[in-house]
Amino acid sequence: MCRQQVQPLGHCTRVRLTAGGRTQIDEVMSGSSYYSQNDFRLHFGLGAAVKADTVELIWPSGTKDMLRDLPANRLVVVEEGRGITNGSTTGQ
C-alpha cells in the first residue's frame, strides 16, 4: 500500500504505457515481505510495437510527467520533473 506522501526513489509511482493501441499500468513498489525488496525497474511487453507511444508517470507527490515515442528494448531512468536522465539499449 502506498502512502500519500513523497517517497524516496519513486516508490509508489504509477506508470501508464500505451503502445500499439494497448495500455498497460504498473506501479513501483518497494518491498514485499520481511528482509526482501522488489526490483524498482518496471518491464512492459510491447508485442510487435517498435515504440511506446506514450508513457505517463504519476509520482507520489501528484506531479505528472509524460514521455512520448520511446523506442522498444530500452532501459530508461526517469526523475520526477526532469524526464529521462539516462537511457541505454538493453544489453549494453
Image (spheres, rainbow, N blue to C red):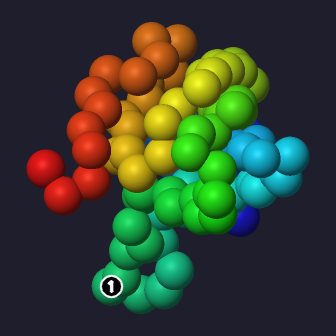
Front one among 19 and 7: 19
What is the number of callouts on the image? 1
- Can residue 64 be spotted in the picture? yes
- Can residue 12 be spotted in the picture? no
Front one among 76 and 78: 76
Image side of residue 61 versus residue 41, left or right? right
The residue identified by callout 1 is: 35
- Residue located at (82% from left, 51% from top): 23
Give the image quarter of residue 74.
top left
Place of residue 82 in the rendered image (x, y in percent of width and height, measured from the top left)? 45, 12
Front one among 69 and 50: 50
- Residue located at (13% from left, 50% from top): 92
Give the image quarter of residue 59.
top right
- Which quadrant of the figure contains the N terminus? bottom right
Q: Give the answer, above or below, for where 34 lies relative to 49.
A: below
Image side of residue 88 versus residue 71, left or right? left
Give the image quarter of residue 91.
bottom left
Place of residue 20 in the rendered image (x, y in percent of width and height, measured from the top left)? 77, 47
Place of residue 72 in the rendered image (x, y in percent of width and height, measured from the top left)? 48, 46
Q: Secondary structure at mark 1?
A: loop
Which residue ends up furthest to the top in the rendered image?
82
Place of residue 70 in the rendered image (x, y in percent of width and height, measured from the top left)? 53, 31
Image side of residue 54 versus residue 88, left or right? right
